[in-house]
Amino acid sequence: MVRVSRNNLLFFALFAGGIVLPTAILSLLSFRNIQNEIFLAQKNFDESKAAFQKEIEETLSKEQERIYQETKAASLFLYELPKSLLEFGNAATFKDVKGIEAIFLYNDGQLVYPDISSRHFNKTTDFSNTVPSPSERQLFWQENNPDNQQNTLLSRSFKMLQAPFETKNEQVQNMLGLIRISYKQKDYDEALRLLSILETHPHLQGYLHADITRAANLLHFEILVKQKKHQEAEDYCLSVLSQFLQSPNIENIPSAKFFFEEAFTQILSFEKLTQEKREAFWNLRANFNRQLGYMDILAKHRELFNELLDNEYTSKDGILFRNDDDITLFKMTYPLLSGNQIVIAKLDNEAFRERILDKLKATALSWKNIPYSVTNEKDSLLLGSIPDSAKVLTQISITDAYDWEFALYEKDVKEIRKESRQRMFLMYGLLSFSLITVILGSFFMLRFITQERKLLAMKANFLSSVSHELKTPLTSIKMFAEMMARGRVQKTEKVQEYSALIGKESTRLENLIGAILNYTRMEHGKGAFKWERLDFSACVQKVYDAVEDIGIEKGLEFHTHFEPNTFVMGDHTALYSLAQNLIENAIKYTNAPGDITINVYNEDEHVVFSVSDTGVGIPASEQKNIFNDFYRVGDEMTRSTKGSGLGLAIVKRVAETHKATISLSSKPGKGSTFTIRFKKVE
């Protein structure tokens, strides 16, 4: 601090050259840049537009490449699967690709997966016009044929009910009724016997739809489950699956899928099923359902598949898309795949679009100020917005899978100006804030320097005053002591007079040193205090008793009122010093004849301590400074009275530490009144 005060000129030069001047230059440059903000905004939009388009294209390309790689990984997994569904017990779980519904594998033009899809697919067969064979005629229409032993099993059942049924159709339906009756009566063996006939002859008499085969299979399976023949039920389900796979024509996919889904689900619920079998049937169900679903897709869109296979065109990345109605396929070949391998994948349109749009939306969030749109083949808006009358700056197709278009639009000049104005206002605000900060900083810096100089002056005045105050009593004490020591004072009256003077000067010296020590103690805060509950009236009474003679000797008249039981929580030494400084100041600055009034009393929740005098008073301009460290009022009063400038500073510190309030009422020539209010304790 002292070094700064001694080099004020250098400090001002550094402050102006290091802060004020650079700030002024930066402000000037900033004002010039702000004026070009509209031009910069337009230029920034043009650059951002190109960057935005590039980022959109890269995002889409990366996400599609990720889908291709995931599809490739899935195809490699499918290549390694067992070729027979009955071997799927040890197959690992297949991980689907989000956006891909089905994957078909070809090698050298031959379908590899799903392997059962290589068969012919027919719609559900209707045998209603089929001509019954001779054996079937014998089975149902010959009542008495003792030479045909294989038909004996039906003859008894139909003879019982043949009379009421006259037509062939009624006779066949009667057989289904017999199965139903046997099942309800829990005659499961008879029901299984009749079901085996239907399963062996699925188009008996040409009256039954081919779906009756799967219905008969399911009832057969459920009867075995009800009989708790779980092992036979498992074997039966696998035998039906084997027959289904070995059939020359794969047909009735929905009914087959329903049967096997029900059968596999019930088998997985068997309590005694081993963990190995449970995993086997779980994988079998998952892979069989997948292959049936793939079969259905291939059957419905075989022409589109053949077109892709026959198309020898291969793009540089090995991807070729085809769309037909609501189906989208893409063919993957070399260089993504090796050799003659080909993968044809069917897109899950909803999931694929959602996956792509989510990535585009995340990218577009960083470019909110650029008008754009993504539309589909029907010109429906997928992302962004289409401005009413804005000019299209760029319009490109962004994906081979769909006919999507990405468009960028010209930004409205008014909108650019609006955004520019917002940025200009922001920059003006920041610049103004910077200038105000520098100005206020300069103001407070100058004020700080001024206060520092004043403080240094007061400290210098304090040191001079204290030196004089210390030197004067010491000189008197030394002089009188030497005179008495050398025997120059012989008379008893003189010895007593000099001894009294030595005692008076010693007390004066002691009080001065005490003030300095008290001030030093206040600098350490609350930690230097010893808190206790005490009667403040008793404390002030002790101070008054100690200084009363000084006031009376000076010709002053005291008026006191010390109310008992004025308890406060505080430090006795600090409170004693507070009272001593206020009372001694009243005596010091009051000339005879004069009055000093000291009061201590309870008032609601407070203990009030007031000291009034009829002394010289304090000017209003000085009242705000009298509690500052080392401050003394006016040169004339400082010369006419002794003091260090610490008394009222100590009073203020003690009051603040005890959370008390201090107030002053004073007029020059009429005296002063200091009032302090402490919080009362019981």
Image (tube, rainbow, N blue to C red):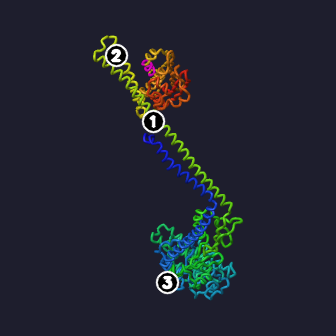
Looking at marks 2 and 3 on the same chain, the residue that comes earlier in the sequence is marked by 3
Per the image, the residue denoted by label 2 is: 499
Sequence-first tag of 1 and 3: 3
Residue drawn at 65 percent across, 61 percent down:
416
Image coordinates for residue 555, horizontal then vertical, percent: 47, 14
Relative to residue 504, is residue 273 depicted above or below? below
Mostly what secondary structure, the magenta segment? helix
Amino acid found under the numbered disc labelled 3: Gly
The residue identified by callout 3 is 339
Q: Is residue 195 above or below residue 424?
A: below
Count of labels in the image: 3
| Residue 150 position within the rendered picture, expressed as x and y whole percent measured from the top left | 56, 85
CA separation, marks 2 and 3?
126 Å
The crowding category of the residue bearing disc 3, from other C-alpha atoms within 10 Å (few below 14, some 14 to 19, many at least 20), is few
Residue 107 relative to residue 38: left or right: left
Q: Mark 1: give few (<14), some (14-19) or many (20+) Cα within 10 Å.
A: some
Q: What amino acid type is highlighted by mark number 2?
A: Ser
Q: How far across and down, in percent of the image, does residue 605 sit?
A: 53, 26
In this picture, which residue range is highlighted in magenta?
539-546
| Residue indicated by mark 1 | 456
465 relative position to 674: left or right: left
> How far apart, in angstroms, are the residues tagged by discs 1 and 3?
94 Å
Amino acid carrying mark 1 in the image: Leu
Do the CB atoms of the residues marked 2 and 3 lie less than 8 Å apart? no
Helix, strand or loop status at disc 3: loop
Residue at position x 52%, y 28% in the image: 662
Relative to 577, 401 lies left or right:
right
